[in-house]
Amino acid sequence: MGKSFFAVVFLALAIKSTAFATPLAPQPVVAGQWVKSWLLCGPIPLKFWNDPVKAWGHIQGFTDDYLNSLGGEANLKVKDGALVKLKKQTLKWASYSTPDSIVDLRKILSRESPLCAYAYTEVIANEDKVWTVAMGTNDGCRLWVNNLLVWDYKVKRPVLPDEDLIPIVLKKGINKILLKVEQHGNAWGYCFRFLPFKPSQLTAKADLFTVTSNEKGETRLGSSLSNLVLSQLINNLKLTVVNDREKTVLEEKRTTDYLKSFQLDAGAFKPFTAKIAYELSSGEKFSQQTHFTVGKRVEYSLFSNGKTNYRISVDPQASESEQWAAKELQHWLKEISKATFDIQNFDPMYRGAQIVIGYNETMAKQANLAFPEEADETYRYCNIGESIYISGGKQRGTMYGVLSFLENESFRRSRDKGEK
């Protein structure tokens, strides 16, 4: 009886250890087939943030590189049995092959939280080619392909197959895949496979390109994809930047280094629109528009505590509707702020803060605007320094501009607070 029980226990231990003893061999890339063989390393203890704002990002400690002794996350060299020494523990990389699509880290590594763990594998591709990584993780994750960080997801979630669709480049031969998954609590795991790349994936969830800029006017195209992937996907890209008057201020064509920076005038805080047209290597064409601002943002107080430094300036030749609009603006500003905005004739020599109603030559010169047709019902409002200019066609355009200014979302929020 005792010997039989011992044999059963020994067999159970042998089965359990076999799951971690299987040597990792590079797997061929097969479209739609789940990647099941991995080296796993974990669990690595983390800490929840006390700051609720930071809690929307990765768990505290997740972004630390725990693999420095093996080359680091971006240059990992690892084999089955390799050790990772942490402050209070030593972890061992171990082989694991999942019986189904999901690698259940909670079952394999730990039922505690918060944690993170690494998963590493290698795949063999027959040619240099763009593929789509289709994966789901519970919870947030980071993904490196051939030492390049290609994906970073920060929010806790359940495992959903193919939730993340990430275009990547696999080179001919062996490719390295490193996945880092965090654990907020309850279920913990991931699933991973490769799917053929489809151009429609580029714009299925968001624009392919973003634009970032700083106060000095240094502006850069960005993307969720790396330059390496973009160079495989795109034949060429045309970038056109226009200002708020639809005047082209920059135009260039790119065939490489799609994400390089460009310089714009940062003399004042200005809005711009980037028009991006690109052609894929397949011949398909896409375009997008992205709005952004350049320059240092300066906020001016329109009124505070029932007082204002502003006046309303109206051209002596203002139309009847423009004069009505000035009085309407004065009335509602008084209602909102309890401050009195005097209405004065526009004086080009005046240097104080003002809200200018209607088009005038000073505005034309400073803002580089063409005189609108009298019946033109379009309008625009902008600031030159601390002064606000609202203009349009004399019949109705300027009047519509004043009404729009009063209904502007940011102005309404300031109105509700009682000051701007």
Image: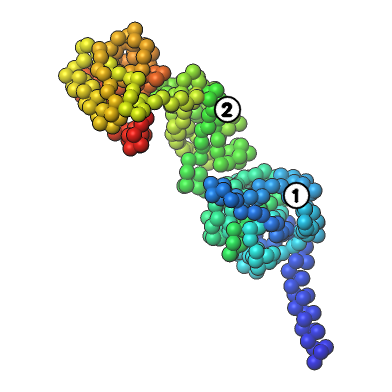
SS state under label 1: loop
- Residue 47: x, y in percent? 64, 54
Label number found at residue 67: 1
Residue found farthest to the right: 3
- Compared to residue 117, the image places residue 309 above or below, namely above
- Compared to residue 29, the image places residue 98 above or below, namely below
Left or right: where does residue 371 sit relative to residue 294?
Answer: left
Query: Where, by quadrant of the figure, is residue 110 drawn?
Result: bottom right
> For mark 2, what is the residue?
261
Res 404 visible: no
- Compared to residue 233, the image places residue 333 above or below, namely above
Residue type indicated by callout 1: Leu
Q: Which residue sits at x=53%, y=46%?
A: 53
Left or right: where does residue 21 sit relative to residue 360?
Answer: right
Q: Give the position of the N terminus as an image quadrant.
A: bottom right
Q: Give the position of the C terminus as an image quadrant.
A: top left
SS state under label 2: strand
Q: Dot 1, crowdedness within 10 Å: few (<14), some or many (≥20)?
A: some
